[in-house]
Image (cartoon, helix red, strand yellow):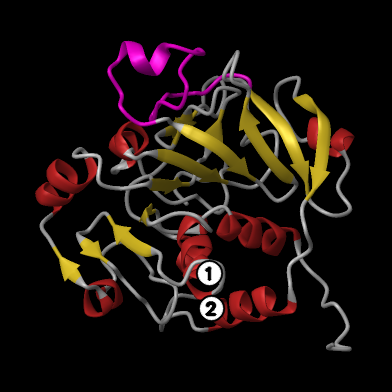
């Protein structure tokens, strides 16, 4: 048995490792750039080596050696099993129900897992903050078998009401997706740097079901913009293994030229997660 001491883990690493674990049983994943891409590429290197990564630009079975800078990163096409046109990707693969999991980020998320990545209200007499927009996220959330969301847990991100509804999660509650004829199950989990939230079947409202090591339910409540409900039995996520952390850190260290510290957090469309959605920024 290894005597190696457990390495220190950051909140982001807890989030990224648990997001990767959420893909352990997936066959295909439509990946957003940013946090979703980090998690999906980590999953393929750890819990699910057979996971087929699919990107909006048309890359199917991408196996990038580093985190892609955008959906148009040449590394995705160079390492893919196949590259198809964007219309074929959406019309045949996505809307045809051929993708198991959609993995998205968010600038704002409400209690029913609806997403805003379009504009942020910066207050009276101030111009609105512009975000990347929808990209393929509305179609991903509508048509994938299920959806996972990943974002940092803060009141500016988990809000009582969205400034703009970009992507429908569970709408206003049960039956809303069916009323629009959306075939996918919608969001089944939201992984944050504090824990995991899942929609309650009766109300479709997000409920705190898991906490990361060292995090309390009160801390999660304080970081949520609505009165966060907590499950009767909240479990604690398993600490990241040394292998998971080593793989994650190696993946981040292999960023492409010119990416800078925040390079892989930049993205096209709304399938990624803005690194910072404060009111002083107009784009991630």
Q: Mark 2 = which residue?
A: 251
Residue in the picture at 42% in, 30% down: 185
Quadrant, the N terminus: bottom right
Residue 122 placed where, x, y %?
A: 55, 29
Residue in the picture at 58% in, 50% down: 276
Name above or below for residue 62 compared with residue 178.
below
Q: Which residues are magenta?
A: 160-184
Among the 4 quarters of the image, the one containing residue 253: bottom right
| 127 relative position to 222: left or right | left
Residue in the picture at 68% in, 75% down: 245
Main SS, magenta region, reads: loop
Among the 4 quarters of the image, the one containing residue 233: top right
Asked if disc 2 and disc 1 are in contact, CB closer than 8 Å, the reply is yes
Whole-angstrom CA distance, mark 2 to mark 1, is 8 Å
The answer to whether residue 221 is seen in the rendering is yes
Question: Of marks 2 and 1, which one's residue comes earlier in the chain?
Answer: 1
Magenta span contains residue 174: yes
| 218 relative position to 109: left or right | right
Q: Mark 1 = which residue?
A: 42
Magenta span contains residue 43: no
Callout 1 secondary element: helix
Name above or below for residue 277 compared with residue 199.
below
Q: Nearer the viewer, residue 221 or 128?
A: 221
**Dot 1 crowding, Cα within 10 Å, few <14, some 14–19, many 20+:** many
Residue 147 placed where, x, y %?
A: 45, 40
Q: Nearer the viewer, residue 272 or 199?
A: 199
């Amino acid at each position: 048995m290894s005597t190696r001491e457990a390495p220190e883990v950051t909140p982001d690493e807890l989030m990224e490792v648990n997001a990767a674990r959420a893909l352990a049983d997936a066959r295909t994943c439509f990946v957003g750039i940013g946090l979703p891409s980090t998690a999906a590429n980590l999953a393929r290197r750890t819990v699910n080596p057979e996971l087929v990564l699919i990107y909006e630009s048309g890359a199917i079975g991408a196996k990038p050696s580093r985190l892609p800078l955008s959906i148009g990163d040449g590394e995705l096409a160079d390492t893919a099993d196949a590259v198809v046109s964007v219309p074929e990707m959406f019309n045949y693969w996505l809307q045809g129900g051929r993708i198991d999991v959609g993995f998205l980020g968010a600038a704002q998320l409400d209690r029913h897992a609806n997403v805003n990545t379009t504009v942020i209200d910066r207050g009276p007499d101030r111009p609105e903050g512009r975000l990347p927009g929808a990209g393929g996220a509305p179609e991903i959330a509508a048509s994938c078998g299920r959806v996972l969301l990943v974002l940092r847990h803060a009141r500016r991100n988990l809000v009582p009401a969205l400034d703009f509804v970009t992507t429908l999660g569970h709408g206003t509650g049960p039956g809303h997706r069916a009323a629009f004829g959306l075939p996918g199950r919608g969001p089944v989990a939201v992984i944050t740097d504090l824990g995991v939230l899942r929609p309650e079947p009766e109300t479709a409202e997000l409920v705190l079901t898991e906490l990361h090591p060292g995090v309390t339910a009160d801390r999660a409540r304080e970081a949520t913009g609505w009165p966060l409900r907590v499950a009767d039995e909240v479990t604690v996520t398993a600490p990241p293994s040394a292998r998971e952390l080593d793989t994650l850190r190696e993946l981040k260290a292999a960023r492409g030229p010119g990416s800078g510290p925040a390079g892989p957090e930049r993205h096209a469309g709304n399938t990624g997660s803005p690194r910072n959605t404060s009111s002083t920024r107009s784009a991630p």
